[in-house]
Amino acid sequence: MRISFHGAASEVTGSCHLVETIAGRVLLDCGMIQGGKERHERNRAPFEFVAADIDVALLSHAHIDHSGRLPLLRKAGYRGPIYATPATIDLVRILLADSGHIHEEDARWTIKRLRKKGKDSSHVTPLYTRADALAVMEQFVAVEFDTWVRLEGLGRVRFIAAGHILGAAIVELEIEDGDDCRHLTFSGDLGVEGARLLSRPSRVERPEVLLMESTYGDRDRDEQGDRTEALYAIVRDTAERGGKVVIPSFAVGRTQEILARLNDLVESGRLRGMPVFVDSPMAVEATAVFSRFPDAYSKDARRKYCSGDAPLEFDGLRLVTKVEESKAINSSRVPSVIISASGMCTAGRVKHHLKSEISNPRSTILFVGYQAHGSLGRVIQSGTSPVRIHGEWFEVRARIEEIPGFSAHADRGGLLGWFDGLGGNPDHTFVVHGDPEASAALAASLRQREARAVVPKPGESFEL
């Protein structure tokens, strides 16, 4: 068996791992690189493998850093099946279509800018289009959780609930390798203990080979008490100052977790009358998908749902899709909560809300998830001022807050707890999907447990 790491190796984004045996080739994820000045060139770079030679693709979950290059994989010649859970398929259809639209808009904006300067724009094309994104959806095959599915001539696969976002899976792969059958587990992205909406990550049996994420592998979150109470305190204090709370949030997963917490606060009477805007067409669509899969909810959320109280619906919630409605939010000075994508502030409507509020000392910018190196979110979070948004410079006068417990990723303790639950050390453990410091720290912690843990470099291959 050979495993090659073509993304999310010593970095967080761009998940893409190739498993090769005598029986064939299996691709685990095909994600987009997010953050960093080189991301555009890197996403356009040819794959380091022949796409047409892949036999099967397996998608752990819908987030763009795991799914975002699938349209390019198809364009490069892959026409085989892409296995994923039903909820992942519903969500990835939304995410990829939106991604294609953004690439088209970016190309149009660049062409317009170059023409205005009298420069040649004939070389400018979108990374892929919305049509490209929808075309790759024809290749998806739905697999229910906890069900082994045969991969013709290769072995079999099973998806186990990872708790990270709706539909997110730990991938268990039994792949034939000559006379042997190798057992490989890919953690995907593991969720957190104590999430309000979704269940915690499932336990799995010890594999021979483990690919394990490490986003928060170097730190335990300082919860500083209950996350709902921390959210309430920030919203209350900002409203008392007459400001707005702008929450950059991923449209899938983070937004719905925050809504579930706000639902509790509104229905308890503590935030009654507070307008809450979800200003992201994609987040609005994704929230509708969540309502179709209540079986994936945590026990508390499922109990609430079964009693007739939908955890993602409450008085004051306004789901915004039209541009005119989005602009109206910024023209109002009424204290409110604005949840908008993208979660790392790299694109989307959140940048317009940041422009409106980042220099307002009465308002708060609240980060509720990981901010990758090179992203605008990380720049703001680090205390830099002024910051550049849409080509303009803005002094940062708003309060900058963070509730790390809302991240959909397990922290160091959660990752190690999940690893300990394997019941024994794998023969080989590859630590992926983390900044170099985080991956190195988790690998060191695993070695203290006498695990054979390595952090692969980008493009590195291992013969097992």
Image: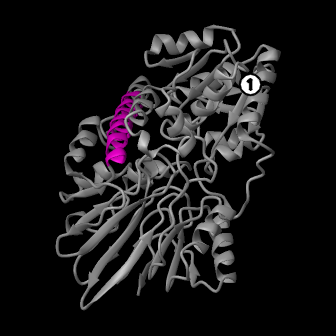
The scheme the figure's colours follow is one colour
| Residue extending farthest front | 307
In magenta segment, residue 97: yes
**At 73% from the left edge and 21% from the top edge, which residue is drawn?**
270
Instruction: Using the image as rendered, state which of residue 189 and residue 458 is in the foreground.
Output: 189
> Is 326 in front, or is 254?
254
Q: Is residue 289 magenta?
A: no
Query: Residue drawn 48% across and 65% down?
Result: 187
Side (left or right) of 74 relative to 120? left
Counting from the top left corner in percent of width and height, residue 87 is at 36, 44
Q: Residue at x 66, y 12 (%)?
A: 273
Q: Quadrant of residue 243?
A: top right
Q: Is residue 348 left or right of residue 232?
A: left
Q: Quadrant of residue 265?
A: top right
Instruction: Give the magenta part as a residue range.
Output: 86-111
Q: Amino acid at mark 1?
A: Val
The secondary structure that most of the magenta stretch takes on is helix
Quick one: 266 or 120, which is closer to the camera?
266
- Residue 242 pos. (x, y %): 78, 13
Picture quarter with the N terminus: bottom left
Looking at this rendering, what residue extends furthest in the bottom direction?
Answer: 179
- Residue 166 % position (x, y): 45, 45
Is the residue marked by circle 1 packed among few (<14), some (14-19), or many (20+) residues within 10 Å? many
Q: Is residue 395 visible?
A: no
State the residue at coordinates (57%, 41%).
300
Q: Position of residue 383 (x, y in %)?
A: 78, 40
Please identify the quadrant where the C terminus is shown: bottom left
Asked which secondary structure carries label 1, the reply is helix
Tell me, yes or no, if residue 225 can be seen here.
Answer: yes
Tell me the residue that label 1 is attached to: 235
